[in-house]
Image (tube, rainbow, N blue to C red):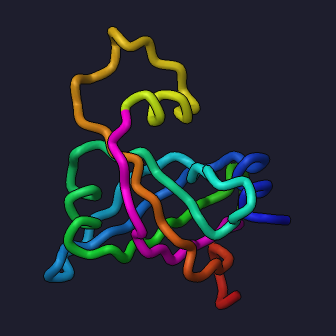
């Protein structure tokens, strides 16, 4: 199963891990990645607020994403990521959001669409 199909069909909880330029770590709950290029299963994107995770990937482009599948057990995936770009087009970001939030309810907060290359995929538990 492709990564795109996996994340489209499996429910669970995701965690994005980043570190600043000096190695100070941060982890945050994140939604499943977006696959914007229909032909590239190694290009993923996340919508990020102007917070610590986003600041960290400005200084250190490497990140990790852990996805724990809903249900019993320790099934899921770990992705090693490298940042390859970002954009701030609010219309594009709004168009790919999975949750429909009325514009008058959105927090007036900068949003970034951050693009990553998937460098490695491993199972949640084990070497893979």
Q: Is residue 86 magenta?
A: yes
Q: Quadrant of the C terminus?
A: bottom right
On screen, residue 80 versus residue 76, left or right, reads left
Q: Mainly helix, strand or loop, the magenta region?
A: strand
Residue displayed at 59% across by 64% down: 43
| Front one among 39 and 62 | 39
The residue stretch that appears in magenta = 74-89
Residue 15 image position (x, y, % from top left): 46, 58
On screen, residue 100 versus residue 114, left or right, reads right
Residue 48 image position (x, y, % from top left): 35, 47
Residue displayed at 52% across by 33% down: 97
| Front one among 73 and 19 | 19
Quarter of the rendering containing residue 68: bottom right
Residue 64 image position (x, y, % from top left): 45, 72
Q: Is residue 3 magenta?
A: no
Q: Is residue 77 above or below residue 21?
A: above
Residue displayed at 46% across by 59% down: 115
| Front one among 127 and 40 | 40
């Amino acid at each position: 199963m492709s990564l795109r199909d996996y994340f489209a069909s499996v429910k669970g909880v995701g965690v994005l891990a980043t570190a600043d330029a000096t190695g100070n770590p941060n982890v945050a709950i994140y939604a499943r990645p977006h696959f914007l290029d229909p032909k590239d299963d190694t290009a993923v994107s996340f919508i990020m607020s102007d917070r610590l995770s986003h600041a960290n990937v400005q200084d250190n482009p490497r990140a990790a994403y852990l996805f724990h599948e809903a249900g019993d057990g320790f099934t899921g995936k770990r992705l090693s990521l490298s940042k390859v770009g970002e954009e701030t087009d609010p219309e594009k970001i709004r168009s790919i959001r999975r949750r429909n939030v009325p514009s008058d309810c959105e927090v007036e907060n900068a949003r970034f669409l951050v693009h990553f290359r998937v460098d490695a995929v491993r199972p949640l538990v084990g070497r893979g």
